[in-house]
Image (cartoon, rainbow, N blue to C red):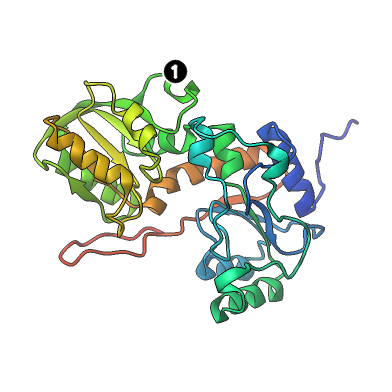
Amino acid sequence: MTKEPYAQEVPLARTVDMRLNAAFGSPISIATAEGLCVGEPMSPVTGAVVCYAPTVEILRRAADEGRNLILSREHPFFVHGGLHHAYLAEGLVSVDPMLALGPGGTDRDLIPSAGLNGDFIVEAKRDLIFASDLIIYRQASAWDTFRPSAQSAALARALGIDLAPDQEQLRRRGVVGTLNEPVAVDALARVAAETLSCTPRIVGDTDLFVRTVAVLAGETDPVESLSALLSEPSIDAIVTGAGGILDEVDGGVSYFQDLRASGRRLSMITVGFGPSHEPGVREMAKWVAQVVPELDVQYWPSGDPTWVPGIELVKKH
């Protein structure tokens, strides 16, 4: 009897990473601070968690449940590389891959240099990781280069926004879709609050009825991306993460305000950077499970830590 590929085998963390990179269509990511962040890559994988941010809460839960491989969008030690996937996906920069490789490697003591080197939170988190034999890989830019609009399309689907088949084939981050029927902006914001367990904010008219909606997961910078996305005059509103639920000093938000001041009537719903990515992370978890079918893969939400006085939300875990 012929044995099915990978059946009954326990893959090493490094093997999982290589198979994911092969599925991405490239052996390595060209973004810095990607790939292996911390841990022993030659360890057998006892279970995988796909999450937006590898927080201490998620790491403790993974250790308790015996899952030692963490695949995340964010870096465990708060590092942001020199290249930004948004600019790469939009074709706004051209970089020689050989000049853009991140640190990676197999250094079990890999921690950020610069300001956080020696920080007690970083040290405590690293101690937790190694005491629990965890391995953390960051797979953000690789995923976004592989499927530039995946995060935005997933966010749109989560909010009940229908997309044309060609939307996900476009080499851009944002997508444009339609609602089954026109709804007020504040009603759509409440759908986002319930679906994403987040605290949305609105820029523009709350009572504007909208049907054609642009969706842009993550930040609204680079502004060139936002400009191209909103160029269609039929768009009534945009749902985005913006620069973070606490960050009003965002170039894209400023551009949007000026766009409205020029006379165009449309509204923006900002749901927070992290919450805007959660639906896409959930879909990435399903993709990882298909690429490595013998691995037990689970999606765990990182949660929105913010709240607004007077607004009661049901936090989903």
- Residue at figure coordinates x 32%, y 54% from the top left: 197
- Against 252, residue 24 (above or below) is above
Quarter placement of the N terminus: top right
Q: Residue furthest left?
A: 207
The x and y percentages for residue 209 are 12, 32
Q: In the figure, residue 199 lies in which quadrant?
A: bottom left
Q: Is residue 226 left or right of residue 94?
A: left
The x and y percentages for residue 142 are 61, 40
Q: Residues within 10 Å of mark 1 (few under 14, many from 20)?
A: few
Q: Is residue 185 left or right of residue 299?
A: left
The x and y percentages for residue 138 are 61, 52
The x and y percentages for residue 60 are 57, 71
Q: Nearer the viewer, residue 221 or 155?
A: 221
The residue where tag 1 is placed is: 166
- Can residue 242 be seen? yes
- Residue at figure coordinates x 75%, y 38% from the top left: 27
- Residue at figure coordinates x 16%, y 39% from the top left: 185
Three-letter amino acid code at the position of disc 1: Asp
Q: Nearer the viewer, residue 88 or 274?
A: 88
Q: Is residue 91 left or right of residue 71?
A: left
